[in-house]
Amino acid sequence: MLSSNLTETRKMGSLYQACSSSVAKSVFSLASSPFIITSRHKITRYYTSSFRASSTSTCQDLKEVRSTDVVDLEYAELNLKYKISEEVGHVRIRQHVNPLSSSFSTPAPVPDWEEVYKDPSLPLMVDIGSGSGRFLLWLAKKNAESGNYLGLEIRQKLVKRANFWVNELGLSNVHFIFANAMVSFDQLISSYPGPLEFVSILCPDPHFKKRHHKRRVVQKPLVDSILQNLKPGGKVFVQSDVLDVAQDMRDQLDEEAKALEHVDTVDTEEGWLRENPMGIRTEREIHAELEGARIYRRLYQKKG
């Protein structure tokens, strides 16, 4: 039975959907990829006809919605809120980490894939900058038999907690590694026994100052590593709520036109996808959209 707090959270999530201009209407289908969910995760609407009748009243109530509540709502079926290890405890996220620091210059050790995954021959999705890991955990639970999921994250405490959650959920198709993707991607992924089918880079650290742009994760060497390991027909999905960062990622990937093609769909507006095709939003997406920000998304496919 739902607790009163969760019920109230769902009410608030419905209010958010009523006011947000970014509510999902449809999600395009790319059925060739096991990693793309073809229907958007739905939030049950609990608001009454009186809320529907008055958009002003609805949006006024929306001011009381906290983005953390909406995150809890969208990921409620994972039931992770109270599954936090004593060792890790509450994790404070340092928003911007310098990947060029010497402390992140050592490549991550390659794991024994047979120990990490039940079936390491399955297609692999890699999420670069996996954050808390909830996004990958949700996907892994939905696709337990069709694919493996790997999160690369530079914040070690987040990795510890995410792997704790993996064990709590009893999942055998998802794993998280403390790694600087700029240094470790090729060494890790080239050793994976199965095909690399999908790479996502979702709302990476923006590093706003121009002198810090070299710290941004999407750089030529990483793009080369992705293309070298990605199977023909494999996909790369990038997004950011910061236009400059999204444009930077787009420009880096557009330069690889001989190997990559931009996937243009009916859901594309001004070259950006209007909706997240993955079936659920990332936590950063939720926070940004609740603040009224637009998310800029691009999807690419490796030519055969």
Image: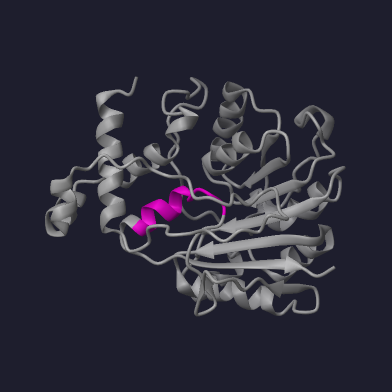
- The part of the image, by quadrant, that contains residue 252 is bottom right
Q: Is residue 8 above or below residue 50?
A: above
Q: Is residue 256 above or below residue 301?
A: below
Q: Residue at x 80, y 35 (%)?
A: 111
Q: Residue at x 32, y 55 (%)?
A: 290
Residue 195 image offset from top left, x and y in percent: 83, 49
From the viewer's side, name the closer residue of 130 and 212.
Answer: 130
Residue 283 included in the magenta stretch of the image: yes
Magenta residues (range): 278-289
Q: Is residue 226 above or below residue 148?
A: below
Residue 74 image offset from top left, x and y in percent: 42, 41
Q: Is residue 112 something that shows in the picture?
A: no
Count of numbered tags: 0
Q: Is residue 64 something that shows in the picture?
A: yes
Residue 164 image offset from top left, x and y in percent: 58, 26
Residue 201 image offset from top left, x and y in percent: 60, 58
Q: Residue at x 45, y 48 (%)?
A: 283
- For the N terminus, the image quarter is top left
Q: Is residue 150 left or right of residue 265?
A: right
Specify how the rendered protein is coloured.
one colour
Residue 134 included in the magenta stretch of the image: no
- The part of the image, by quadrant, that contains residue 271 is bottom right
- For the C terminus, the image quarter is bottom right
